[in-house]
Amino acid sequence: MRRLTVLGTSAAYPEAGRAASGFLLEHDGYRLALDLGYATFPRLLHRTGALDLDAVVITHAHPDHCADLSALCRARYFAAPRPPRLPLYCPPGVVERVQAMEPSEDLHDVFDVHPLPAAPATHRLGPLRLDTAHLPHHVPHAGVRLSAPGLALAYSGDAGPGPALAELADRADLFIAGATVCGTAPRDPYLLSAAQAGLWARRAGAARLLLTHFWPGADRALALAEARRAYGGEVLAAEEDLRLAL
């Protein structure tokens, strides 16, 4: 089984009934959490146990992408017996940000931390290959490509457009892209707009585009329309608990 479950879709903070950024990728029994922002952990528990994850990848240190790493840490820290350390792949600043919420529990007791540098890097995560590259944002940010035979998934996280995005999303089966800006909102070099998400999906030759990271109160139908004007493939708006076969 190869499946992506959307845990959360909101930018900055969760709207009522929603969560901030987060996904669960399942690949033939291997389970990977991709970002764990506010309110994603309870949704994760509806799909898998805290002790059943095989790895976590966090794109950057903003709490709408990493805050619930703290909840995952506590669930594993206080488990009896405590499980082996969980591989955690993240750029600088993530562990420090989450550790600041933990006065007594050391994240390094729970996670085997693998820093993601600004330079392009490749890691092996079970059956998956993880490729990362720096994308423009307000803090160090890793764009992500996860691949295996017959599967390629790319994720822009919360970043703006950059040359590495085309390579990360090159012919991806699914390109998950932020749509933080849409309508008449001013463009920001550190964020993707829905229209830019469509443009980069077209440039990369991605098979499907999944829009996410919607600003609270945003018109998601408008974001879809703007992305579709730039990209002729299938465009979806992420919704909490949406499950996509890969």
Image (spheres, rainbow, N blue to C red):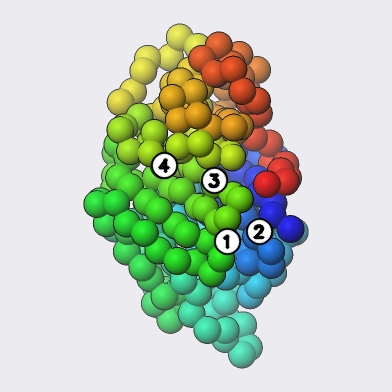
> Mark 1 and mark 3: span between their CA atoms?
13 Å
Q: Name the residue beneath numbered marker 4.
A: 168
| Between discs 2 and 1, the one toward the N terminus | 2
Coordinates of residue 209 in the picture (x, y in percent)? 58, 31
| Between discs 3 and 2, the one toward the N terminus | 2
> Mark 2 and mark 1: span between their CA atoms?
6 Å
Q: Name the residue beneath numbered marker 1.
A: 32
Q: Nearer the viewer, mark 2 or mark 4?
A: 4
**Amino acid type of the residue tagged 2 in the rendering:** Glu
> In the displayed structure, would residue 232 be above or below residue 24?
above
Q: Secondary structure at mark 4?
A: helix
> Mark 2 and mark 4: span between their CA atoms?
20 Å
In this view, the residue farthest toward the front is: 149
In this view, the residue farthest toward the left is: 119
User: What quarter of the picture does the N terminus occupy?
Assistant: bottom right
Splitting the image into 4 quarters, where does residue 47 fall?
bottom right
**Amino acid type of the residue tagged 4 in the rendering:** Leu
Q: Nearer the viewer, mark 4 or mark 1?
A: 4
Coordinates of residue 96 in the picture (x, y in percent)? 32, 63
Q: Which dot marks residue 26?
A: 2
| Between discs 3 and 4, the one toward the N terminus | 3
Task: Classify mark 3: residues with Cα within 10 Å, few (<14), some (14-19) or many (20+).
Answer: many
| Between discs 1 and 3, the one toward the N terminus | 1
